[in-house]
Image (spheres, rainbow, N blue to C red):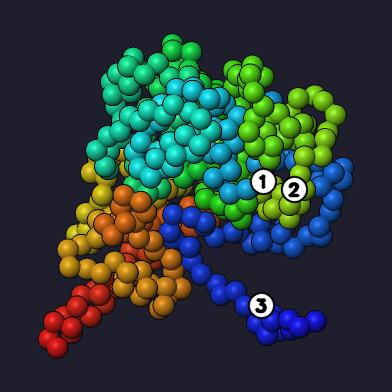
């Protein structure tokens, strides 16, 4: 052969240990990491299917739902967004999207690609939408589908009035889709009680499993909507009716749809087991207590929150305004270089304007909250010194 084996693959793999305090992923627990080292088994072996059934029960618990159509999409959180939209949208359907940051606009882009007639209801950056704003948008647009993000990781905004939105959706006979990727486990979410038709989340945030599987649940209203389609779902890989058969959701024989990663199933199963052992209420309270500790510490440091209203702040991901004259890149680089700790900058509309700190899963402890405060203070001071030295030159 003319092409030789690459020299880089002759070196042993090295992965540094880092503390992931950005918007995700979060660090995995030792229990999850140990589970990932189990032997690979076949994607249709009885043991694999049993693990999938156990995961389904865990997902129902965290979503607080009894939906039979509860499963995972093999892919990152984006795959949940793609799957929800491509299964429900047909050409010309009016899709109303709530925008409180980047992810509403991303959903709008995806919905357009599936032929949706997309309308936006937007608000001032750093704020959530009021019920009056949403009600007016419904009256004007008469949507078939309404999409909302419970917590937008780009802005740190929490959309806390989902129950009232769910009631509006029922009045207008509209399918209600909620993205809970950045919020689930850090704030309350009651899928059935709040009339949510489709919900999805990520495995890598508060759950503390590796990215790559996206829990999703659909109620009978959503499934009926899919069954009533005049055209086939445009993406075979995201076809919920087929994936649901693989996940034993419809009391039908299990089919082969794709080769799921058994390894990722192990990790997610154990992450869900840990959450269940702690209890959902206690899990949420822990995240909220850590968020409060972080916010009080930031206030003591003289830093300004990007989301001014405390009731509109996402507990899992906190956005802090970059102080005037501070190079945000240097702050992030300092924390990583000296402490192997991840602090993130902004995303989408907040690039260059905010720091984003995540307290999720294993990292949602008071000790980690105090640690990140000390490192952030030190990193900002270091950035000031660098700026002063340059100005003297």
> Outermost residue, left direction?
392
Numbered mark located on residue 13 in the image = 3
Q: Residue at x 71, y 28 (%)?
A: 241
**Can you identify the residue that label 2 sits on?**
260
Tell me the quarter of the image containing the C terminus: bottom left
Sequence order check: which comes first, mark 2 or mark 3? 3
* Disc 2: CA contacts within 10 A as few (<14), some (14-19) or many (>=20): some
Q: State which quadrant residue 123 falls in.
A: top left
- Left or right, 247 with respect to 233, comes to right
- Left or right, 51 with respect to 176, comes to right
Q: CA distance from mark 2 to mark 3?
A: 25 Å
Name above or below for residue 114 compared with residue 74.
Answer: above
- Left or right, 48 with respect to 286, comes to right
Tell me the quarter of the image containing the N terminus: bottom right
Using the rendered image of the protein, determine whether residue 266 is visible from the camera's viewpoint: no
Q: Position of residue 391 (x, y in %)?
A: 13, 82
Using the rendered image of the protein, determine whether residue 234 is visible from the camera's viewpoint: yes
Q: Position of residue 6 (x, y in %)?
A: 69, 81
Element marked by disc 1:
strand
Numbered mark located on residue 74 in the image = 1
Element marked by disc 2:
loop
Element marked by disc 3:
loop
Q: Depth check: 133 or 105 in front?
A: 105
């Amino acid at each position: 052969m003319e092409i030789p084996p690459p020299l880089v693959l002759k070196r042993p793999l090295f992965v540094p240990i880092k503390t992931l305090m950005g918007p995700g992923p979060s660090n995995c627990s030792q229990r999850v990491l140990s589970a990932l080292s189990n032997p690979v088994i076949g994607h249709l072996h009885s043991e694999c299917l049993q693990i999938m059934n156990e995961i389904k029960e865990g997902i129902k618990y965290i979503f607080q739902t009894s939906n039979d159509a509860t499963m995972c999409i093999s892919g990152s959180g984006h795959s949940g967004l793609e799957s929800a939209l491509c299964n429900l949208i047909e050409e010309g359907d009016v899709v109303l999207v709530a925008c409180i940051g980047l992810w509403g606009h991303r959903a709008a882009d995806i919905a357009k690609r599936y032929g949706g007639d997309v309308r936006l209801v937007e608000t001032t950056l750093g704020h959530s939408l009021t019920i009056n704003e949403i009600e007016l948008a419904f009256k004007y647009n008469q949507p078939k589908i309404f999409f909302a993000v419970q917590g937008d990781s780009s802005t740190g905004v929490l959309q806390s009035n989902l129950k009232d939105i769910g009631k509006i959706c029922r009045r207008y006979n509209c399918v209600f889709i909620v993205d809970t990727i950045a919020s689930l486990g850090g704030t309350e979410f009651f899928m059935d009680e709040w009339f949510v038709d489709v919900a999805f989340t990520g495995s890598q945030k508060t759950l503390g499993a590796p990215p790559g599987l996206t829990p999703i649940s659909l109620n009978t209203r959503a499934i009926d909507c899919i069954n009533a389609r005049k055209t086939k779902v445009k993406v075979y890989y995201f076809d919920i009716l087929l994936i649901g058969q693989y996940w034993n959701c419809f009391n039908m024989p299990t089919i082969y749809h794709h080769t799921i990663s058994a390894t990722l199933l192990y990790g997610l199963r154990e992450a869900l087991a840990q959450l269940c052992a702690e209890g959902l209420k206690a899990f949420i309270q822990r995240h909220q207590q850590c968020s409060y500790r972080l916010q009080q510490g930031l206030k003591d440091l003289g830093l300004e929150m990007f989301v001014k209203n405390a009731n509109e702040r996402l507990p899992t991901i906190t956005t802090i305004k970059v102080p005037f004259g501070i190079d945000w890149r240097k702050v992030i680089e300092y924390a990583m270089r000296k402490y192997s700790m991840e602090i993130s900058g902004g995303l989408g509309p907040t690039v260059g304007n905010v720091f984003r700190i995540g307290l999720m899963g294993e990292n949602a402890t008071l000790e980690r909250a105090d640690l990140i405060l000390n490192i952030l203070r030190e990193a900002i001071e270091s950035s000031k010194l660098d700026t002063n030295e340059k100005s003297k030159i």
